[in-house]
């Protein structure tokens, strides 16, 4: 994970994660205080956002998860590798788990 203060946006942090999930892995249901930008590199991701039908993302596809929207990351049958980018205010949690 890359986590860096932003000199041009005081009190903000840029967080970049190289997300790798094993085949059919399911992550923790959660939300972020700010938007999350997801770009799939390998495999596939099944994105489950509360109140919406699941969406499959393939290599080269991207998705913006709005701030404070509850979602559950899931890997497809070959697993997934994706780049995740977020900008947070200093001191905000990276994510907040939600009990389904």
Image (cartoon, helix red, strand yellow):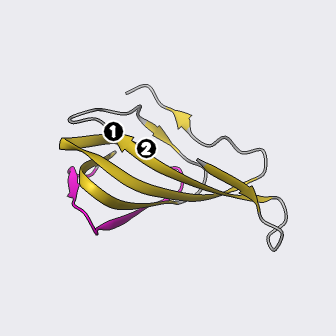
State the SS at label 1. Answer: strand
Camera-side residue of 57 and 17: 17
Residue extent of the magenta highlight: 52-68
Quarter-of-image position of residue 94: top right
Q: Position of residue 72 (x, y in %)?
A: 35, 40
Residue pointed to by mark 2: 70
Residue 21 badge: 1
Task: Tell me what residue is drawn at x 21 percent, y 61 percent.
Answer: 58
- In this rendering, would 47 be left or right of 12? left
- Residue 96 to residue 76: above or below: above
**Discs 1/2, front:** 1
Q: Position of residue 18 (x, y in %)?
A: 47, 50
In this view, the residue in front, 61 or 28, is: 61
Q: Indicate the position of residue 59 as horizontal and vertical percent values.
A: 25, 63
**Residue closest to the eye, 49 or 57:** 57
Marks 1 and 2, how far apart at CA: 19 Å
Q: Residues within 10 Å of mark 1 (few under 14, many from 20)?
A: many
């Amino acid at each position: 994970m890359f986590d860096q203060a932003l000199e041009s946006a005081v009190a903000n942090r840029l967080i970049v994660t190289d997300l790798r999930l094993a085949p059919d892995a399911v992550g923790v249901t959660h939300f972020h205080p700010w938007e999350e930008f997801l770009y799939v590199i390998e495999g596939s991701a099944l994105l489950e956002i509360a109140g919406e039908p699941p969406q499959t993302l393939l290599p080269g596809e991207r998705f913006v998860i709005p701030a404070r929207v509850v979602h559950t990351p899931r890997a497809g049958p070959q697993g997934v590798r994706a780049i995740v980018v977020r900008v947070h205010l200093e001191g905000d949690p990276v994510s907040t788990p939600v009990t389904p």
